[in-house]
Image: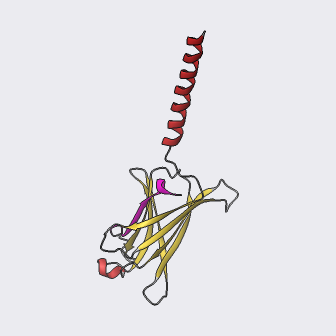
Amino acid sequence: MKKTFYLCILFLLLIYGTVGTLASASSAPTFPCSVVLEPVNKNDQNAKGAALLYKVKLTPSFPRTSISIHALHLPDPSTLGNFDTYEGFAFIKNEISWRFKLYPTPELDGPTWSGRFDEITSAMNSAEVQVRPSNTKTEKLGPAILSNDVNKCK
């Protein structure tokens, strides 16, 4: 009887540990959340940004995910090549991507770049959010300047 009791306790602890581990292993962000966008090039240590992700219901259809970006102290896009602006870029590798304009606000030490995109219908598991230079005429995107993984959202 005592042996059966201990076996039951051991079994329950094993089940509890397995379920707890699986629940904590889920890396999907819970909304709303925000993530700090860090510079890809460590020489751009003053460049930083933040992305806010949350669910919006702007039409009678189902809710969508909104991403907004606020980025500061970015180098002038023209110093990075044939670019004249910045864009927000979010993607799930080998699946889908979204890009949207960031707009500058005039400030003394360079603009703050910000923008948003409200039309994401995919789950954002394993998505990455970036700020990239862009050419408005050719629509070519440059390399990521700021970046972070949505799974680091808090």
Q: Nearer the viewer, residue 3 or 70?
A: 3
Locate the N terminus by quadrant. top right
The residue depicted at 51 percent of the width and 42 percent of the height is 24
Q: Which of 36 and 78 is in front in this view?
A: 36
Can residue 73 be found in the magenta stretch?
Answer: no
Give the magenta range.
Answer: 143-154
Q: What sort of colour scheme is used for the picture?
A: secondary structure
Measured as percent of width and height from the top left, residue 19 is found at 54, 33
Left or right: where 82 falls relative to 88: left
Q: Which residue lies furthest to the front in this view?
A: 2
Q: In which quarter of the image is residue 118?
A: bottom right
Q: How many marks?
A: 0
The relative height of residue 48 versus residue 11 in the rendered view (above or below) is below
Measured as percent of width and height from the top left, residue 49 is found at 46, 71
Q: Quadrant of residue 74?
A: bottom left
Can residue 144 be found in the magenta stretch?
Answer: yes
Q: Which residue lies furthest to the right in this view?
A: 60
The residue depicted at 31 percent of the width and 70 percent of the height is 42
Left or right: where 92 falls relative to 116: left
The residue depicted at 49 percent of the width and 68 percent of the height is 50
Measured as percent of width and height from the top left, residue 79 is found at 30, 81
Measured as percent of width and height from the top left, residue 40 is found at 34, 66
The residue depicted at 50 percent of the width and 37 percent of the height is 21
